[in-house]
Image (cartoon, rainbow, N blue to C red):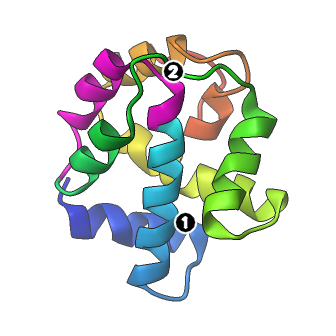
Amino acid sequence: MRYDEFLARVRERGEYADREEAAKVTDAVLEVLAGRIPASEAEDLAAQLPAPLDDRVTSAAAEQPETYGVEEFYRRVGKRTGAHERTAQWDASAVLTTLAQTVSPGQLNQLISRLPTGYAALFGRADLTD
């Protein structure tokens, strides 16, 4: 998937006013996600994303990822976007369901397996995919 197509899908799902808002939300969500997973996993994920999203993920990756649950994930997204937690949930869902359609099922399973229970729903999944 191309970058402009990714943003168009995020914009549609999130009902954002324009491409710039979709890009801002996408960057915030991917940066928070990258800080939550191991650097090697971030590199694998980035390899399946269009530029410049691949760079966003690799530059935000941490050698020692932080561990926190879904509520903290929302809080961190909201802090980056200036949104309330409920809006941050909406934002995370718009970006991560698009991401789930962009990467391979194997990559998605690997990513979800690195995260605690509850994160799969952010990707529009009940659990690991088949």
Quadrant into which the C terminus falls: top left
Residue 38 magenta = yes
Point out residue 111 in the picture as x, y percentages from the top left corner: 44, 20
Q: Which residues are magenta?
A: 34-50
Q: Which mark is residue 25?
A: none
Between residue 31 and residue 5, name the one nearer to us: 31
**Picture quarter containing residue 57?**
top left
Q: CA distance from mark 2 to mark 1?
A: 28 Å
Q: In this rendering, would 52 be left or right of 108?
A: left
In the displayed structure, 97 sits above or below 34; it is below
Query: Which of the two discs, 2 and 1, sits closer to the camera?
Result: 2
The local crowd at label 2, few if under 14, some if 14 to 19, many if 20 or more residues have their Cα within 10 Å, is: some
In the displayed structure, 88 sits above or below 65; it is below
Q: Residue furthest front?
A: 63
Q: In this rendering, would 47 be left or right of 68?
A: left
Disc 2, SS:
loop
**Picture quarter containing residue 3?**
bottom left
Q: Residue furthest bottom?
A: 17
Name the residue at 36% across, 67% down. Answer: 7
Q: Which residue is mark 1?
A: 13
Point out residue 35 in the picture as x, y percentages from the top left corner: 49, 33
Point out residue 113 in the picture as x, y percentages from the top left corner: 52, 11
Name the residue at 17% across, 59% down. Answer: 2
Evaluate if marks 2 and 1 touch, with contact meaning CB atoms under 8 Å apart. Answer: no
In the displayed structure, 52 sits above or below 72; it is below
Q: Main secondary structure of the magenta part?
A: helix
Residue type of the residue flagged with mark 1: Arg
Residue type of the residue flagged with mark 2: Pro
The local crowd at label 1, few if under 14, some if 14 to 19, many if 20 or more residues have their Cα within 10 Å, is: some
Q: Which residue is mark 2?
A: 65
